[in-house]
Structures are given as structure tokens and as C-alpha cells.
Amino acid sequence: MDRRRFVIGASVAVAGTAVAVTGTPPFGDVPSAAAAGEERFTSRGRAVAIQKIGNSAHAVINGRHGVHIERMLDGYATHLLPFGTYKSPRKLVEAVIQAEDAGLLII
Amino acid sequence: MTGTRRNILSLSSTEVQRLTSAFNVLKANGTYDQFIRNHVAAMNVATPPGSTRNAAHRAPAFLPWHRATLLDIENALQAVDPSIEGMPYWRWQNDTALNGGDPRRSPLWTAGGIGGDGDPARGNRVLNGPFAHWVALIVNNSTGALVPRSTPGLIRLLGRDPRGSSSLPTPAQVTDAIDRYTTYDRSPWDASVATFRNRMEGWSGGPRMHNLVHRWVGGDMLAGTSPNDPVFWLTHANVDRLWWVWQGMRGVNNYQPTSGGPTGHNLNDSMQGLVVPRTPADVLDINRLDYNYV
């Protein structure tokens, strides 16, 4: 059986985004600018922060880098729940958290 | 090996038992879980990195990739039990009408079929049927690893998953895809185009067709680890059958792109995440692959 290993493109993309979210800002005004594009809320007991970056976004859940979000068609998509799109990054993250509670995945 | 793929509802109970027993052998010896890993791996290969396409979805290779992985598991099942004729298909577009408007009543979803709906009182676990003891593999997104779920039982929420959809595709959706879309695929080769591939996958005008079936079964079928549920294979055998019907009308070799498309999706590109490496060109003609649909 072919057991080739694969480059995990999505993981690379997530790692790249994580730098953008957590890297030390070079200038003092960057944190406030970043915060302006950030949405924070609580879902099922998890603290969520969504950082929108161009056509993608990244959700930090309970302080951990959680979900990479892609703009697709008229909504947002994730490879974790790959058979549909969501109207907003928040709706998407809420669905992923529900999926974790249902036992379908681990964020 | 050769395969004759029939409507699963036309199989005898003995034939269904042979099939589910062979699935259980593959699950027990680890072969089955490799198919789940392959699907997740293909889904995680963005083509190219940063795009919404991956090696097996949202792009032209969606249909040939799944045709190839169906061949791989069909061969594995027949290696366990050569009396298995082929991978049966689930004609999902007919089940609503066949069951008085409620496709959950289909004999498919019984202990003598592939097990029933999940039990809401038990975390929507499937408690009956041939796969009731299965332990699913789920993605740990923090580590990228696939790990066994902590408790056994597949998860299904037929038509009632809040993250999914409440209805299956209709025969009208099938007719729409086959009759109206004469072009297999076109640039930019993604989820945005109005083509046969994208109508079948279910993004164009969606959710519909393939995506809608995943969403109706719900539970494990909603995640990238969807092959956890063997209904994945029955679902895709019908998708493959409908592609073959379309190929009969539009031409067997009517695949696009022949070149210049995303890597992994051109006619002669190697597709990633398969047991037997194949190109789209390798799988266009099912007569050359020694199986047929009846």
C-alpha cells in the first residue's frame, strides 16, 4: 500500500497566519490597528477571537490557535467541515465548536 | 478484479452481509482507517497552497479522485471476499419519494442494512447494525493527527444535523446537472464555476447533490473524516454512476483541464492521496477499469 506522506498545505497556511496574529508588533500602533479587525465572543464556554486577514481569517479559541477560515463563494469555509459555507466567520466557528462538542473533531 | 455495481436496495440480505462483513475485516486489520487518512490528507493539500481547492475537492479532480479511491476500496473488499460483485451504490435522489417523503425509513438505515440513525439520547451514536462497534478516527486540529474517538459508535443525524441539511437531492437536481451542464469544468477551476463537476459536487447553486448528501446524513459525514461512515462509499458510487451517465452523453474523454490547470488536476497529473497512484486520464473510461453499473 502506498503510504506516502503529504505536505499539509492548510497547516502551513495556519502557521503563517499564526505569526501574523501573535508575532511581536514592530510599531506601537499595530496592536490597536489589529484589534479593530478582531471579533471576540464566547460560544459554549470557549472564548473566541477572530482575526480577519485579507480574504481569510483565523480564530483563536481559548487562547489556542484554532481554525483557519477561507472566504469562499458568498460565505466562509473551513476544511474541518468541508461540505458547506457559513455566512460569517462567527457562524463558522460556532459550528466547529458544536462539532467538537458532538465528538466529530478536536479543535 | 472486475466489478458489477448494483443499487444496494436490490442486493439480497446475504449479499449485504457479505459486504458489511468485508468492511468489518478491513476495519479490524487497519486497512479501512488508511482510506480515512487518505481522504483527510487529500483534503489538506491545498492546490496550490493558499487556494480554496484541495487535491480531491472544489476542483476538477473531484470526480476522478473519488472514482479512483472507490476502485481502491472495492479491490480491498473483493480481496477479502471475492464473491462481492462490486461496490453497490445508494441512489439517494430516489429515497424521499420511495419512502413516503421520509428517506429515513429506507431499509438502508436498518440493522440489516448499514445501521440506523443515531440515538439522540446517546450522543447520536448508531447503536445497531454491522458497524455499531466501530471507533471513528477524528482530526485533532491542534496537532494535525488523526486520533480514535474516545467512545465507540458512528455518529449520524439523518436530516436533523443543525450543521447540515434537512433534505436529500431530488431527481430534478440530478436531471439539472446532467442535462444542463455540457462542460465538465472551466477556469478558474474552483467552487465558483457553473460546470458539470461543480454542479455534481454541489457548490454551484448549492448546497446540492454530493454536498447535500453529506449534509443530510450529518454527524461523521459532515467532517473531513467522512469515510468513517461506510455510507460514504455508497454515496460516492452513485456520484460516480451519474458521472458515467453524463460521460455517455457528453463523451468519455471530455475531461478538463487537459493542461494549464492547478497542479494535481490536469488530465495527466498524478492525483494525491490514493492507494494506487493514478491520473484523471487513467480513470475516465470505466470499461478499461473493468467495472460497470447495472
Image (spheres, helix red, strand yellow):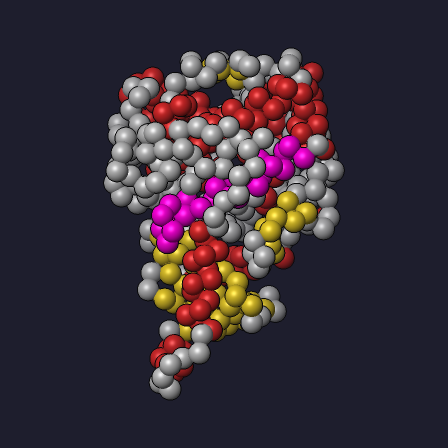
The segment highlighted magenta reads B30-54
Residue B276 or residue A78, whichever sits in front: B276
Identified at 58% across, 57% down, the residue is B143
Determine if the magenta segment contains residue A71: no
Rendered position, B258 above or below A39 = above
Is residue B158 in view from this perspective? no
**Left or right of residue A74, residue A9 in this image:** right
Magenta span includes B40: yes
Residue A87 spot, x, y in % from top left? 40, 57
State the residue at coordinates (56%, 68%). Answer: A64
**Residue A84 percent coordinates (x, y):** 44, 48
Picture layout, residue A5 above or below residue B291: below
* Residue shown at 57% from the left, 41% from the top: B37
Within the image, what quadrant is residue B249 found in?
top left
Q: Quadrant of the N terminus of chain B?
A: top right
Residue B114 seen by the camera = yes
Q: Residue at x 48, y 71 (%)?
A: A49
User: How many badges with numbers are in the image?
Assistant: 0
Q: Is residue B268 left or right of residue A86?
A: left
**What residue occupies the far bottom of the structure in this picture?**
A28
Q: Give the percent coordinates (x, y) of residue A40.
A: 48, 73
> From what the image shows, is residue B200 above or below residue A60?
above
The residue lying toward the viewer, choosing from B195 and B268, is: B268
Residue A101 at x, y percent in the picture:
63, 57
- Please tell me which residue lies in front, B208 or A36: A36
